Amino acid sequence: MGIRADHHRTPPAPGPGGRPARRGPRDWAADFACFAVAVVIGLTGLDVLRQHPGLPAGVAVADQVVGALACAAVWVRRRYPLGFAVATAVVAVVAQTAGGAAVVALFTLAVHRPFRQVAWVAAFSLATAPLTFWLYPDPTLNMLAAVVFAAVLLSATVGWGMYVRSRRLLLESLRERARRAEAEAELRAAQAQRLAREAIAREMHDVLAHRLTLLSVHAGALEFRPDAPTAEIARAAGVIRDSAHDALQDLRAIIGVLRTGDDTDGARPQPTLDALGDLLDEAREGGTPLTLDRRVTDPAEVPPALGRTVYRIVQECLTNARKHAPGAPVTVTLTGGPGEGLSVEVANSAPAGPVPPVPGSGQGLIGLTERAALAGGRLTHGPRPEGGFRVTAWLPWAP
């Protein structure tokens, strides 16, 4: 259970300023019981004093005063368990009425200190038991019986104290384990919430950025070319209307997921590789010259999760190409098969002229890199030597 034998803390725990914490009703009851035990055993020692022939009255009075002080010191036993045990063990050698306080002190030491310290004090008390019997002989016992009785009493006291100590340490270990489990559960819940928020944010970016970028590019074209032909303006306005409508539909779907907490495929269908053609057709309608080179051995066998990752990569690359190189030709290449993985390359040429500024946070490629890493693959990107930009990804495809 992880119980440490070198536990040195002494309950009650210190309060503010180093002062002992306020005792509860249970602590007061335990202290009173220990005080009562010390007094009862001390009264037994007083009876031995009365049976001692020729004992000077002053010695008897001094013995009783020392015993009373030792019993009164029981109330501070928690604060100084080792010092109190050593002091009472020494005093009990010459003071019969302090024997009860010595027993209580040994019990307290066994509860609050490691066994090595308890063993030294108990061994000292056992070794001095013959001397105490010699100073104050008991007419009803001989020397051997007195030593055996002392050994039994000390063993019982130490054993009970060590049992109490072990039980306290076990309970503290269980409490600590419960606190740690609760903290870990809260941490896992917080991590799950963070991952859910990141997944929702990534999904919103993937879904809405494509639509809104298309809308922004065509709106910018209308702004910079107010003298464009009527047919071209009408086509751009139609693309803007359709993009805005699709963006609203996607936004409603995502908000519905947030409200219901249901992120299953039935609540919000996810795109797969089969939907890639519709995405490319939409890009072509938006004015992007696009070429698809698909050399996949068995497209129908592409797993849904893998197809969804490919779709999101191509979607983000088309969005970036439309932002930074509107009208430039884009080539999408898919190669691979089961066992060898699926490679995706999206490359666009440099724009023919100046590009109107389009707002963006630059997080799209970072998100793609994370998405590929989560799928067990890798993604690289950068400018091409002949101009333009290239994104290359490799994703594992189990055979």
Image: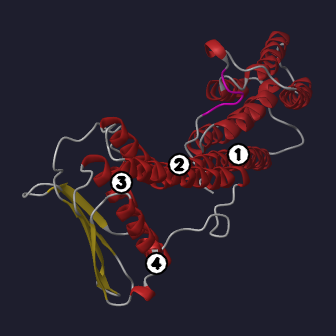
Which residue position holds label 2? 244
Please, what secondary structure does the residue beneath circle 1 have? Answer: helix
**Cα separation between marks 1 and 3:** 54 Å
Which label number is shown at residue 274?
Answer: 4
Mark in the foreground, 1 or 3? 3
Check the image and report above or below for 189 versus 275. Answer: above
Q: Is residue 259 visible?
A: yes
Return the disc, 4 or 1, that comes first in the chain's sequence.
1
Residue 214 screen position, x and y as percent: 40, 50
Residue most extreme to the left = 385
What amino acid type is highlighted by mark number 1? Arg
Q: Is 113 on the left-hand or right-hand side of 132? A: left
Which label number is shown at residue 319?
Answer: 3
Which residue position holds label 1? 175
**Cα separation between marks 4 and 1:** 55 Å
Residue found at x 68% / y 27% = 13
Return the disc, 4 or 2, that comes first in the chain's sequence.
2
Residue found at x 24% / y 50% = 325
Check the image and report above or below for 392 versus 242. Answer: below
Return the disc, 4 or 3, that comes first in the chain's sequence.
4
Check the image and report above or below for 345 versus 122. Answer: below
What amino acid type is highlighted by mark number 2? Ala
Contact flag, marks 4 and 1 (Cβ < 8 Å): no
